[in-house]
Image (cartoon, rainbow, N blue to C red):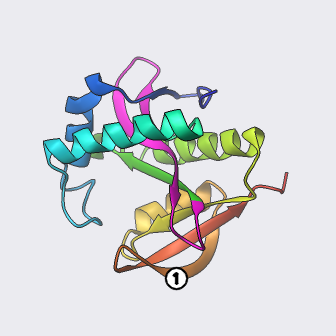
Amino acid sequence: MDVPDSPRLRFRRMSDGDLDLMESLLGDPVVMEHYDHPMSRSECRNWIDWNVRNYARDGFGLWVIETEDGDFVGDCGLTWQPIDGESLELGYHVLPRHQGKGLATEAARAVTEFVRLRGGVDHVIAIIDPGNTASVRVAEKAGLSFWKRAEYHGREALVHRADLRRT
C-alpha cells in the first residue's frame, strides 16, 4: 500500500528511471541549502537504491511526488532514523519552482495520515536543520510540534514530533 493521492498531488515509488529527476532535486543548491552539500549523480543513484530497499523491507520510503498533470514536484515519505533508538521520520524535498505553494505541506499531511492509518508506530518525527524555517513551518502545518534538540550526523537538529495515537 502506498500513499493515496491528495487533492493536488500523486505519489509513486522511485525507480531507476528517476535518476535525472532526483538529480534535479537533490543536486539543487537551494533544495540542499541546509544539508552538507548538493548531491552528486552517484549520490542520487544511491538515494534511489536506498529507497527501493526501504520499500522492499518496510513497505514505504520516500515517494516521488508529482502534480496531477505529471509535473515533478519532489519527494516525500518515511524513513527510519537514529533518534531515540530508531524513529520513523517524515521527510520532504520540493523543487524551488514549487516551493511556497503549500505542496510540501499537502504531501506531508498525506504521508502522516497514511502512516496513522497503516498503524504500527506511535509517532513520526521530522529532523530539521535549525536554520530551515520553511521546513519547520511545513512540519508544524502537517501536525508535528517541536519536541527536542538532538545531534544528527554530527550536527545540531530540531526534532518535531506527531503522536499518531490521537485522532
Number of residues whose C-alpha sits closer than 10 Å to that of mark 1, classed few (under 14), some (14–19) or many (20 or more)? some
- Say what secondary structure mark 1 lies in: strand
The answer to whether residue 87 is left or right of residue 19 is right
Magenta region, mostly helix, strand or loop? strand
The answer to whether residue 21 is left or right of residue 58 is left
Residues in magenta, as a range = 63-87
Q: Is residue 68 magenta?
A: yes
Asked if one can make out residue 25 in the rendered structure from this viewpoint, the answer is no
Q: Say which of 52 and 25 sits in front.
A: 52
> Residue 63: where, in percent of width, then height?
46, 35
Height in image: 158 above or below 62? below
> Residue 88: where, in percent of width, then height?
59, 56
Asked if one can make out residue 158 in the rendered structure from this viewpoint, the answer is yes
Q: Say which of 19 and 30 sits in front.
A: 19
The answer to whether residue 58 is left or right of residue 34 is right
> Residue 20: where, in percent of width, then height?
20, 30
At horizontal 27% and vertical 22% (from top left) the residue drawn is 17
At horizontal 75% and vertical 58% (from top left) the residue drawn is 122
> Looking at the rendering, in which quadrant would you find the N terminus?
top right
Query: In the rendered image, which residue does mark 1 sit on?
Result: 149
The tally of labels here is: 1
At horizontal 34% and vertical 79% (from top left) the residue drawn is 154
> Residue 91: where, in percent of width, then height?
47, 52
Q: Say which of 101 and 122 sits in front.
A: 122
Which residue is outermost to the top?
Answer: 69
At horizontal 50% and vertical 35% (from top left) the residue drawn is 55
Snapshot quadrant of residue 2: top right
Q: Say which of 123 and 58 sits in front.
A: 58
Height in image: 91 above or below 19? below
The answer to whether residue 70 is left or right of residue 147 is left
Q: Is residue 71 magenta?
A: yes
